[in-house]
């Protein structure tokens, strides 16, 4: 059985990095770390997690980051900007 691929956007924050670790520990999914700064993700997250560059302010970069993704967790801070970004 193929594991679904989950992209966690906001993966380097407090909640996002905890979610990434729990998903990895479950062993039921392939986890991708959506982040504006892949180097930061490499420093903060398990080595098995592939960082994927995604900036929600760059609409053109969203679709490529979603390539091969089955599920998305959007774990960013709540703000007016976040509301605008999540619509993209």
Image (tube, grey):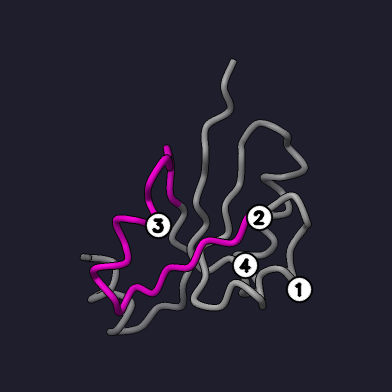
- How far is disc 4 from disc 1 in space, using C-alphas? 16 Å
- Residue positioned 42% across, 40% down in the render: 68
Q: Position of residue 21 (x, y in %)?
A: 73, 54
Queried whether the magenta region covers residue 55, the answer comes back as yes
The residue wearing badge 2 is: 20
Seen in the image, is 67 located left or right of residue 46? left
- How far is disc 2 from disc 1 in space, using C-alphas? 13 Å
Seen in the image, is 80 located left or right of residue 20? left
The residue wearing badge 1 is: 43
Q: SS of the residue at dot 2?
A: helix
Check contact, mark 4 vs mark 1: CB within 8 A.
Answer: no
Quick one: quadrant of the C terminus? bottom left
Q: Quadrant of residue 17?
A: bottom right
Seen in the image, is 29 located left or right of residue 10? right
> What stretch of residues is rendered in magenta?
50-72
Q: SS of the residue at dot 4?
A: helix
């Amino acid at each position: 059985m193929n594991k679904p691929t989950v992209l966690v956007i906001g993966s380097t924050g407090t909640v996002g990095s905890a979610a990434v670790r729990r998903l990895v520990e479950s062993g039921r999914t392939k986890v991708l770390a959506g982040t504006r700064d892949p180097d930061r993700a490499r420093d903060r997250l398990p080595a098995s997690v592939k960082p994927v560059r995604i900036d929600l302010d760059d609409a053109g970069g969203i679709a490529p980051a979603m390539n091969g993704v089955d599920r998305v967790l959007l774990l960013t801070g709540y703000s007016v900007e976040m509301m605008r970004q999540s619509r993209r």
